Image: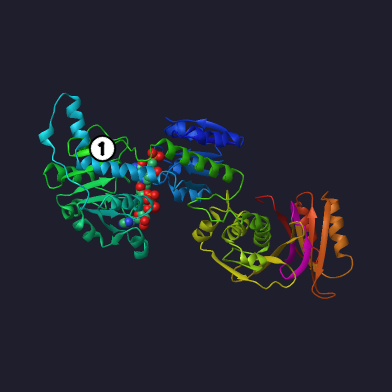
Amino acid sequence: MKVLVTDPIADAGLDVLRDAGHEVETGYELEGEALLEAVSDANGMIVRSGTEVTEEVLEAAEELAIVGRAGIGVDNIDIDAATDNGVIVANAPEGNVRAAAEHTVAMTFAIARSIPQAHIRLKNGEWAKSDYLGAELDGKTLGVVGLGRVGQEVAKKLDSLGMDIVAYDPYISEERADRIGAELVEFEDCLEAADFVTVHTPLTPETEGLIGEDELDLLGDGYLVNCARGGVVDEDALAAKVEDGTLAGAAIDVFAEEPLPADSPLLEHDEIIVTPHLGASTEAAQENVATSTASQVNAALAEEPVANALNAPSIDESAFPRVEPYIEIAETAGKVAAQLLEGRIEDVEVVYEGEIADEDIEFVTASALKGVFQPLEWQVNAVNAPQIAEDRGVDVTESKTRQAEDFQSLISVTVSNDDDEVSVDGTLFAGNDPRIVRVDGYRVDAIPHGRMVIARNTDEPGVIGQIGSVMGEYDVNIAGMFNARETIGGEALTVYNVDSEVPTEAKEELESDERIIGINDITLNGQN
Ligand SMILES: NC(=O)c1ccc[n+]([C@@H]2O[C@H](COP(=O)([O-])OP(=O)(O)OC[C@H]3O[C@@H](n4cnc5c(N)ncnc54)[C@H](O)[C@@H]3O)[C@@H](O)[C@H]2O)c1
Ligand SMILES: O=C(O)[C@H](O)COP(=O)(O)O
C-alpha cells in the first residue's frame, strides 16, 4: 500500500513502513493541488506539524485509512473531518516528551541568563559583561499551565533544581500534582504566584488566546516560556508587554503562524528569545516518534488495533486476538438486520452474552454499527460508524450478560423503529467458524458469506420447491439453505446462500405467490 509522508521523519520510521512491504512516497514541500493529488491514492499518511490536514485533503484522500502524527500536537489535523471520512488519526504521545521538557528547561535558563543575547554580542566582538545581570531559578516559583506529560516532566526537572512549583490544569487530580511536588491552584493564582510561567496545553478552541494582556499583567515582571503551541499566548500582547518593560522576558519555541514571518513583533525585542519549533528536534525523539507512528500506520493498514488512535474505538492490544473473531460476525449481524428492517433505522441495540461479555467490546459494537450503516452509507467503517449513528439521531445501546443459553458467546444486533424490529444473532463455532444462529426469532444455522436470500413463507408443502425452481429459472444458483419454522403450518423462514443477485423479476414472481410473505436479497460484501 502507499504511505505518503509529507513532513520529514527519521529514516528508521520510513524503514518500518518499507519493511512491512509498503511503498513510501515522501513529499515534504507538497501544498495545494499537488498535495491533493499525492494523497488521492494514499492508504496511509504521516505528518508532523508542517502539514495542514484539512477537510479538503481528507476528502481528496479516497483510499486513506490513517493519518499518523509523528509527534504530539494534532491541531493541524481536522479530526472531525477525519472521523467523518472514516480515517483514523493517531499520534505518538510519548516519544518526544523528554526532548520537549529539556528544551523548555533550556529556554528557561537561556532567558533567565540572557544567553542568546550575550552570545550574539560576543560573536560580534562585544564583551558586554556588565549588561547582563540574570535571575536564578533556585528559590523562584514556576507556574505550569497544563500539567500533562510535558508539563509534569518540566515540573519535575525544575523542582529538582530548587524551584517551587504551582500549576493550573482543570483536568488533572490534586493527587497527581502532589506526586510530582506541584501545588494545583486556580489560573489567576498560578500567574500571580509565578516568577516564570511555562505553557504546556494543547491548542484547542478553549486554550486559544488563553494568555493575553490581562493574564500577562498578573505575571507582572516575570518571564513567560511557551514551548507548547503558538496561539495559546497572544503574540501582540506579549510583544507589547516586553516592549513597555512590564514583562522581564519571554522564551518562545512555537508560533501562531509557522514558519514565523520575518515581520513578527516577536523578533523585534532582545528580551524575547526564539527557536524555530525545536522542542522535539533531538535524534532520540525523532527516532521514537517516527517508528511509533510508522508502526501504527502498519497496524491500521493491516486492520489491527492502533495503539494511540485519537478518534477510533479503542481496543486493548493484548485482548485483540480474543476479540478479533467477533468483529466480523458483529458486522454481519448488523448488515443482515439492517437489510431486513422495513423503514428507517431509529435504534440499534447490541447485546453480548457469555464469554465475550468479559471483553472490551467498544470496537465490536462499532463494527456492528458499521454493518448496520454499510448498506446505506458510502465509506462507513468502525471509525466513523458511531459518529454516523449520532449524526442520524440513531440511539445506540449496548449491554452485556455473562449468561449465554446455548453458546459460549453470542452477539445479538437488533435494529428497530416505531413499526418494526429485527434481531440477528451471531456466534462462533469451533475454530472461530462464524454462524448466524437466529434471525428475527427463528433459530437457524447459516454461514454468513457473500449473498444470501432470506425468505419468509407459510409452512406448507411445495413452497421451498417453488422458491428453488423460480431461482433456477432466473439462473440463481443455491449454494446452501437452512429452514426454520414457528409451528407446523405456521410461518417459516429460510436462509439461502446464493451465488448471484436475485433479479427483481424473480423477486416479484416469488412475492406474487400468496404463500410467500417476503423475499430479502442480502449482500454481505458491502453496498447493495
Ligand atoms: N515545541 C515542541 O516541539 C513540542 C514538543 C512536544 C509537545 N509539544 C506541545 O506541548 C503541549 C503539551 O504536550 P503534552 O504531551 O504534555 O500534552 P498532554 O495532553 O499530555 O498535556 C496537556 C495538558 O494540558 C491540560 N489542559 C487542557 N486544557 C487546558 C486548559 N484550558 N488550561 C490548563 N490546562 C489545560 C490537559 O489537561 C493536559 O493535562 C502540546 O501542545 C504539544 O503539542 C510541543
Ligand atoms: O507536538 C509536537 O509533537 C511538537 O510540537 C513537535 O512538532 P514537530 O514534529 O513538527 O517538530
The residue depicted at 86 percent of the width and 63 percent of the height is 464
Looking at the picture, how far across and down is residue 528, in whole percent?
67, 51
- Say if 471 sits above or below 462 in the image: above
The answer to whether 234 appears left or right of 23 in the picture is left
Taking depth in this image into account, of 519 and 348 the one nearest to the observer is 348
- Say if 428 sits above or below 273 in the image: below
Looking at the picture, how far across and down is residue 449, in whole percent?
75, 53
The residue depicted at 14 percent of the width and 26 percent of the height is 126
Label 1 is placed on what type of residue?
Val
Taking depth in this image into account, of 205 and 248 the one nearest to the observer is 248
Magenta-drawn segment: 436-452
Quadrant in which the N terminus appears:
top right
Q: Which residue is mark 1?
A: 274
Taking depth in this image into account, of 14 and 4 the one nearest to the observer is 14
Extreme-top residue of the structure? 125
The answer to whether 313 appears left or right of 410 in the picture is left
In this view of the protein, can residue 41 be seen by the observer?
no
The residue depicted at 36 percent of the width and 61 percent of the height is 179
Count numbered badges in the picture.
Answer: 1
Residue 8 is covered by the magenta coloring: no
The answer to whether 383 appears left or right of 342 in the picture is left
Corner quadrant of residue 65: top right
Looking at the picture, how far across and down is residue 183, in whole percent?
28, 61
Sort mark 1 into few (<14), some (14-19) or many (20+) by Cα contacts within 10 Å: many
The residue depicted at 52 percent of the width and 40 percent of the height is 294
Label 1: state its secondary structure. strand
Corner quadrant of residue 121: top left
